[in-house]
Image (spheres, helix red, strand yellow):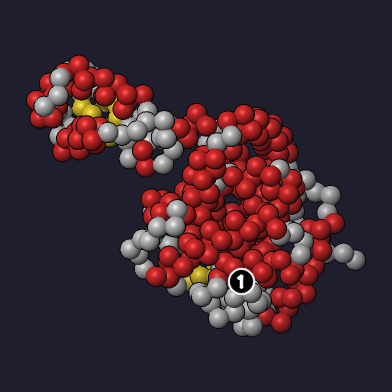
């Protein structure tokens, strides 16, 4: 009898599947109309940064962006290697098939090369999932891993379960088996993105990992609850909500307004005066336009015009009343 992962399909899960299907259709049209290559780059950066941050990597979005652009960054070599590997894995994602064990191992090799001795191979020893000093999950014995993964991949290749649910089920089962000595979290998230992208290619450009990082405790709680119930439903529900939130946060309008450090304000070329204004405001958030004009040596009308432009691009906002409030630089 073919392997069948344990899961319950609830009305809440079905509603989320319907909402995601509708939202992804709208987003696909928006991406196609805008041809937003820079937006795709920002989302790729967030995907990589989010997935690595869950595993303790401290590289910032700005540092990941620099690595994506081929620049050198000053950071722990291991963390830089993790970033290079993750970028390479997400760039190669389109060439892999979700149900292929060879591709799964190849992806792990790309993701973990230079980081673990068993990169590209299933683990040869037992492993436990820790929470602090407490073991919260003892993974199956190492000699069972090849068969368990073979059954899971075979199920994935033949199931008629909706790809949204199938991707979540695979992700949970993968984490339960914990087939590698290291990199299981990164691989599980990468493979879920791969499964989703075979259904809707736009998923390659949606940073679900970034949302998971923001709700990291809930992510691990959903895994634990699914294990305790011997049912994937809690994890399916959690991940579907993360997917929906990521889609709704990936529209051009929302991303455009997230500030300078999101790296997508290509429409505004910051001048030396703009930088001077922002620096002066950072130093004194109560500074007035007249004081800015005096300290920069520019006309008041020029300062007011640049302030309006900075506010339009969400790099600057006014908090409180015009006379008694203060400025806030959006980072």
Mark 1 neighbour class, 10 Å CA radius: few under 14, some 14 to 19, many 20 or more: many
Q: Is residue 193 left or right of residue 113?
A: right
Q: Quadrant of the C terminus?
A: top left
Q: Residue at x 47, y 54 (%)?
A: 68
Residue 292 location (% of width, % of height):
14, 27
Q: Residue at x 74, y 68 (%)?
A: 101
Q: Is residue 296 above or below residue 131?
A: above
Q: Quadrant for residue 188, please give it.
A: bottom right
- 193 or 28: nearer the viewer: 28
Q: Quadrant for residue 289, please give it.
A: top left
Q: Is residue 234 left or right of residue 76?
A: right
Q: Residue at x 57, y 47 (%)?
A: 208
Residue 212 location (% of width, % of height):
53, 50
Q: Quadrant for residue 117, please give it.
A: bottom right
- Residue 50, can we see it? no
Q: Residue at x 71, y 82 (%)?
A: 143
Residue on which disc 1 sits:
109
Q: Is residue 163 left or right of residue 58?
A: right
Q: Is residue 8 above or below residue 220?
A: above
- Residue 200, can we see it? yes
């Amino acid at each position: 009898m073919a392997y069948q992962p344990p899961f319950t399909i609830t009305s809440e899960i079905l509603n989320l599947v319907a909402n995601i299907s509708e939202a992804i259709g709208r987003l696909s049209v928006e991406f196609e109309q805008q041809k937003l290559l820079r937006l795709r780059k920002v989302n790729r950066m967030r995907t990589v940064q989010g997935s690595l941050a869950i595993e303790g990597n401290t590289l910032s979005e700005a540092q990941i962006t620099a690595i994506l652009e081929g620049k050198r960054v000053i950071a722990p070599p291991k963390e830089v290697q993790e970033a290079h590997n993750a970028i390479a894995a997400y760039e190669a994602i389109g060439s892999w098939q979700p149900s292929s064990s060879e591709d799964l191992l190849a992806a792990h090799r790309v993701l973990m090369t230079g980081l673990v001795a068993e990169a590209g191979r299933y683990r040869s020893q037992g492993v436990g999932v820790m929470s602090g000093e407490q073991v919260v999950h003892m993974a199956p014995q190492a000699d069972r891993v090849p068969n368990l993964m073979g059954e899971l991949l075979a199920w994935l290749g033949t199931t008629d379960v909706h790809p949204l649910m199938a991707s979540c089920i695979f992700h949970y089962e993968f984490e339960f088996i914990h087939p590698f000595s290291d990199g299981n979290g990164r691989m599980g998230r990468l493979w879920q993105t791969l499964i989703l992208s075979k259904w809707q290619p736009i998923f390659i450009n949606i940073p679900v990992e970034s949302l998971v990082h923001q709700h990291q405790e809930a992510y691990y709680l959903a895994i634990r609850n699914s294990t305790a119930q011997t049912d994937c439903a809690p994890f399916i529900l959690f991940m579907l909500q993360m997917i929906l939130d990521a889609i709704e946060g990936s529209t051009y309008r929302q991303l455009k307004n997230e500030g300078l450090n999101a790296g997508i304000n290509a429409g505004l070329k910051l001048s030396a005066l703009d930088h001077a204004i922002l620096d002066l405001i950072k130093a004194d958030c109560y500074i007035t336009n007249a004081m800015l004009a005096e300290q920069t040596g520019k006309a008041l009308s020029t300062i007011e015009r640049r302030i309006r432009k900075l506010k339009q691009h969400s790099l600057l906002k006014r908090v409180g009343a015009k006379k008694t409030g203060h400025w806030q630089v959006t980072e």
